[in-house]
Image (cartoon, rainbow, N blue to C red):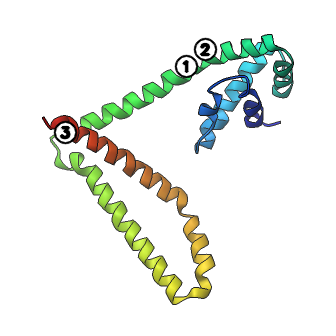
Amino acid sequence: MDPITIALGLAQFVPGLIRWIGGDDAEKAAKVADQVVGVARSVTGRPDGQDALTAIKADPALALQMQQAWLAHEIELAREETRQLAEINATMRVEAASDDGYVRRWRPTFGYAVALTWTATMGAISWAIVAEPAQAPSIIAALVNTSPIWGIALGVLGVAVVKRSQDKSRRQP
C-alpha cells in the first residue's frame, strides 16, 4: 500500500494529520505521508507501513503513542512552515521599503499583466469557439490544460493583493 493511503488510514488516530497531507501540493503530501508512516513504523517497531497501521488499529495504547509521537513531529513541521512564512514576510517588507520604484510596483504591474493576459486569452477562446463551433470541445480541453498555470498566477496575484491591502491599511492613520 502506498504511503499516502497508509497516512490516510492513520489519520483516524492522529488529529490534524489531514492538514498536512491534504491540499494541492502532491510533493509535500507525499513527503509528509512518508514521514507519518516512518513515525508509525518507529512507534510499532514494524518494518512495513501497512503492518504498522494494522498494529495501531488493533492496539489503543499504540494509537495513543502514535498520536504523541506525531504531535512532536508536527511541531517541527509547524516550525518549518513558520520559518518559510517569515522569509516571505521579510521579502515583502524589503520590497515595500525599497527606494526603487519598480520594486515597490512589481505587484501592481504583475496584476495588470495577469488581467490583460486573462482578457486576451478569454477573448481569443470566445472568438475561436464562435468562429469554429465544431472545435469547441478541443478548445475547451486545451483551456483546461492551462489551469495549473492560471492557478499559480492567480495564487501569486491573490497573495500580492491581500498583502498590499494590508500594507496600505497600516500606513493610513
Which quadrant of the structure image shows residue 15?
top right
Q: Amino acid at mark 3?
A: Ser
Task: Name the residue: 50% across, 25% down.
Answer: 80
Q: Position of residue 81 (x, y in %)?
A: 48, 28
Query: Type of residue at label 2?
Result: Ala
> What element does badge 3 sit on?
loop
* Residue receiving disc 3: 98
- Identify whether 104 is placed above or below 36: below
Quadrant containing the N terminus in the rendered view: top right
Mark 1 surroundings: few (<14), some (14-19) or many (≥20) residues within 10 A:
few
Q: Which of disc 3 and disc 1 is earlier in sequence?
A: 1
Residue under numbered circle 1: 76
Q: Quadrant of the C terminus?
A: top left
For residue 161, side relative to residue 71 (left or right):
left
Q: Nearer the viewer, residue 46 or 53?
A: 53
Disc 2 and disc 1: Cα gap in Å? 7 Å
Tag 2–tag 1 contact (CB < 8 Å): yes
* Residue hosting label 2: 72
